[in-house]
Amino acid sequence: MILRPSPHISPIFRAAFSTTAVKSGYTSNIGKQAIKYPTNVTLTPSPTALSVQGPLGTTSVPLHPFVHLQFSEPQTLSVSVEDAKEKKQRSMWGLTRTLIFNAIVGMTEGFSVPLYLVGVGYRAAMEDDPRGKMPGWTGKRLAMKLGFSHSVYVPVPEHIKADVVSPTKIVVSCTDKHQLGLFAAKVRRWRPPEPYKGKGIFVGTERVRIKSVKKK
């Protein structure tokens, strides 16, 4: 017996039972997008990594054996995988494309994010680290007053550039988006935004919904 949709059924409900709604293939909406990079960037692939060289330096993106790179057009890179049906390959497809894109942006423009100190008496300043310059560190540190009985000090690593543009605003920059996020989270951890008075260290456009205190 063959079932046919009734002409009286709404087209919206009819589409729900249509065979065209069945997923015909496996793909990654992010991974399938080609990457266009500027002429001042050089990409050098190898069996295990992709080297990205730009005006701000050189970095590399690790590659899995099932990830393939194609330079079909000038200044254009396409990423693909051997078998998109496998969940791991499909997820790494989009992740690898994002890592390569971030590496290109980092080596040409870099990344930056502002940190806002919100609270009565909250202040930040840049000062010399009394321990001096050590391997991997700039010899500078952030000195912040965050409502504690003591000041909070956060050393600045070499791969991070921190500028205190005002007593309540810090701008941190880096060529690596991941490392930038880690450092911003490290600073934020000292005073995460709280939902009752709206105080804390806010990263970028971060917002917090203020809760009302119920009185007994």
Image (tube, grey):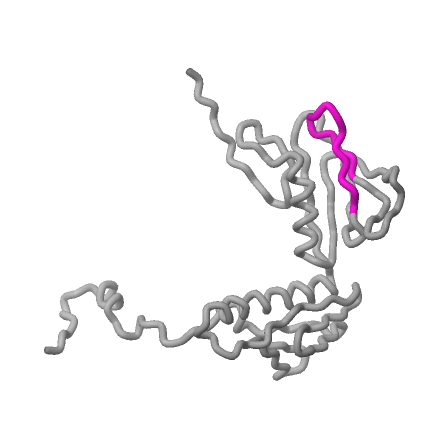
Q: Magenta part of the protein: which range?
A: 142-156
Total number of numbered discs in the rendering: 0
Please identify the residue farthest to the bottom as the structure is shown.
Answer: 72
On the rendered image, what quadrant is the N terminus found in?
bottom left
State left or right for residue 18 relative to residue 82.
left
Which residue: 64% across, 39% down?
Answer: 189
Residue 58, how many percent across, how many down?
77, 67
Residue 128, how many percent across, how many down?
87, 39
Which residue: 64% across, 45% down?
Answer: 204
Please identify the residue farthest to the left as the structure is shown.
Answer: 1
Please state which of residues 173 and 68 is positioned toward the viewer in this rendering.
68
The secondary structure that dominates the magenta segment is strand
Identify whether 94 is placed above or below 150: below
Identify whether 84 is placed above or below 198: below
State left or right for residue 165 relative to residue 26.
right
Please state which of residues 113 and 44 is positioned toward the viewer in this rendering.
44
In magenta stretch: residue 216: no
